Structures are given as C-alpha cells and as structure tokens.
Image (spheres, rainbow, N blue to C red):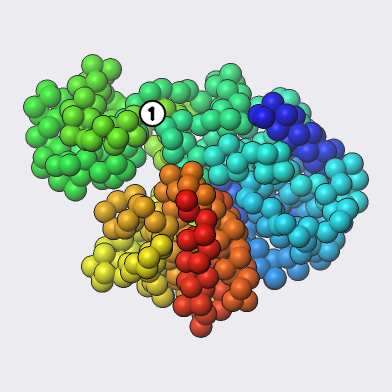
Amino acid sequence: MQGSGTARLEGAASAAAEAVRAAGSVLIVSHIDADGITAAAIASSVCDRLGKEHRVVFLKKLSEEGIGMIDSAPEPLVWICDLGSGYLSAFSRPGIVITDHHVPDGSRKAGQMSLDSFSDMVHVNPHDAGMDGSTEISGAGVTYLVAKAVDPSNTDLAYLAVVGACGDVQDSEGRLVSMNREILNDAVADGSVSVSEDLRLFGRETRTLIQFLQFGSDPSVPGLSENGAECARLYSSLDIPLKDGRRSRCWNDLTPAEKERATDAVLSRLSPEDAERAIGETYTITGGRPHTELRDAKEYATLLNACGRYGDAEVGMRICMGDADALAAAKDRRTSHKQNISSALAMVKEKGLVKRRRFIQWFDAGSEIQETVVGIVAGMLLNGDGADRDMPIIAFADADDGAKVSARADRSLAGRGLDLSFVMRTAAEAVGGYGGGHSVAAGATIPPDRKEDFLDAVEDIVAAQII
C-alpha cells in the first residue's frame, strides 16, 4: 500500500510544485507549533530560491477570521501549511495549495480537489493517499515533498521536516517510519542529520547529566526521576564524572563506554515495557552547535514550540532559516515555556482537576492554563502519573473565541478503534463548534456554556468506537 500511496502523494506534491512555480507572489499561512514553523521555513525557502515575492502569516487555528483573510488575500496563490485540510469546504477563492497531514474535511466541494488546474485547489495530504498523518508524515514533511518536487536540490531542507516530525511526536514508537523514513534518508544522505540508537530521554545536548535523568520524564525512572541526589550517586557509582573541568557535562559528552554503563543502570530500574520504550533512535542535526538546542531534533522542536506557543513563531522560523540572532530570544521563551508547563502540571495535580467518567477523563483549566499549551499539559499528564493511559483525556481552557478543547490518547487506543479526530469534529459540531486533528491528538473550539453537552457527546462516540 505504501508504494501506491507514495506515488499518489508525490503526484499531488508535483501538482502543488507547478502551482507554486506559476504564481507571481505567494502568501504562506502556517500553524504555530514546531511542525508548522518548520513547514513555513521550508515553504519560505522554496519561494526565496524561486525568487518569489512572499509573506508568512502564522495562525493558532483556522477560525472564520483566518479563512476570511485567506479568501481575501491579494496574492494569486495562498500556500497553507500544517493547516487547512479540515476546512476544505470553507474556502471560496481559487489559487490555494494545502500541504497538511490532519484528517481532511469530508464535505469538500465538488471539483475543489482537481490536481491539474491552478484555478482550483491543490490538496496534498497523506490521508488522501491511504496513509496515516499522525505517524507516517508530518505537515513539514508534506511541505518538504513539494519543495523536493520544485527542485531536487531542496533535499538540504529535509532536516527541517525531521524536526517537524519529532515535534509532532511521530517518532513515538522509537523511530520515524514510512514517508518520514524516506525524508530522514534524504537528510542523512545530505549529511544534515545523523541517526543513532540511544536512551530517548529529553535533553541530550543542553541538560546536565543529573538533569537528564532527573527530568527526562518519559518514561519515569524509579528512584531517579525528580531525585537529583540519587542521580548524582548513580553516576558516582559508575565512575562517570559530572564535569569536564569547570563545565558540566551533558549526556552526549559521555564516551561510548560511559553511555553503555549509564544506560544499563537506567534500564535495570525500568519494567521490560518501559525499558523497550526508553531505547530508540535519536536524530542529531549535524550543523547545530554542540550543547545547544539546535543539535538534537527533539530539543530543536521544543525550542520552536516554545516560540510558537508564546507568540514568537516568526522568531522560530528565523532560527530555522539560519538567523543566529534569533536563538537568544527563543531561549528566553523556552525558559518561560518550561516554567509554565511545570506550574500547570503541578496545579492540575494539586487541585485534583482530572475527573473520570466511564470512558473518558477530563479537566477544565479555565484561564489558569494558556490555550496554546493545554494540549501539552494533557499529553504529559497522560504519559506521567497524572492520568489513566487506558482512556482518552479531554482538556478545556478559556480562549477568545470560546472554550479551547484538546484531546489526547495513548496510541494503543487507536489500535482498538479510537479516532479522536472524528470524536472532536462530530461532538463539536453537535454543540455548535468545530474540531478535528489526528486519531490520538485532536482539538476543538466550542461555546463555553456547552461543555457538559460536549462531554456527553464525546463519551457516547468513544464508547461506540473502542473495541
């Protein structure tokens, strides 16, 4: 299936490339997370290399205002990245290219999907090719396919699609697969990414050795997570120095022998299931300076997410396009991001906000957690000790245009029939809202006074879906 699906997806990418080449100028519209920011950087780089006049606009979500802005844009072509597939029937203008990986709108207009007419819409999406957009390719990856179709030499942008995929947690099974794998191979061939098997805790480049084990979090390591003193004792027992002169060492400073000893010690504390999950591929961005966030794909993505969640997606894109001055500003955002996430997690746990129904669990953060990060908090609760991994979690936060809803679920539930994209879209429409996303990560916006009705609808659909 992948062979025919790949051909179909690449065919759509070629049609999109022709539309981009033919356009006099381009408006690029993209999402604010790491996947959207890397997608925008890829699209902008393509336009730069073609000599196309273009501008970039970032959106948290596609609202009526955003759709109106796209429909009325003066540019002959609007290139929408990591957004748009859920709203195909909402656009009224010609000249749209969509490179997205979310579940498409099922009520698309007749004739709107023509791939041979620039006057209509070119939609490049893995779901239309029989692929899963939550695991096989990200929004940045789809955008990269168009870049490669424009000019094969654009393979030097493949590393950004790898970062985007990692930002969307598409390596959650320990490695990138399917079309993500093909893109990774391009990046490796280009020399911009190297792959290794390693302990997949967070912070291989920027956290000290103690912080790496103390705060790595997923999976939690008994006796080490949240216990810096025990982490220090472990390294001492393994004859692994914490410093190199006056500088604190990070995980990637360890020699192969030191890494092996430390990894074995960590794995010995984990259950067989968690031990298997803790080891997998890691992706090093070879052009990134060691001991910075730009060296490790996961840390790179986290830095970009911090930019986007706090209104600085443009700074994130500047980093992707090689602007060294943007890194310092982004680091400040990352520090705030980490502090906000930590405070939000603690608040949800301390106040006991997570409530359970028969088939779902949920919490309402109100105005205490920003709408741009409530989904991250929900996911971390699910992967930690704050929620039940056997049922989806629904999180509410106040937003300017209603109640923001974020839904997350363990991937095992998708294997049992769960599709949160359908759940969010259907339940939201039932209460006068809108939603969509992926099978295990989706969202919605609903009227704030319809939360209980929404939860009732969600529970009914989830109960019907899960085997």
Q: Is residue 346 above or below residue 323?
A: below
Q: Position of residue 74 (x, y in %)?
A: 84, 61
Residue in front for this viewpoint, 273 or 114:
273
Residue at 18% x, 29% y is: 268
Which residue corresponds to mark 1?
280
Q: Position of residue 194 (x, y in %)?
A: 47, 23
- The amino acid type of the residue labelled 1 equals Gly
Quadrant of the image containing the N terminus: top right
The answer to whether any part of residue 18 appears in the image is yes
Q: Is residue 431 above or below residue 82?
A: below
Residue in front for this viewpoint, 208 or 113:
113
Residue at 83% x, 38% y is: 15
Q: Position of residue 446 (x, y in %)?
A: 56, 74
Residue at 35% x, 61% y is: 340
The answer to whether any part of residue 211 appears in the image is no
Residue at 33% x, 69% y is: 355
Residue 338 lies left or right of residue 231; in this view the side is right
The part of the image, by quadrant, that contains residue 291 is top left
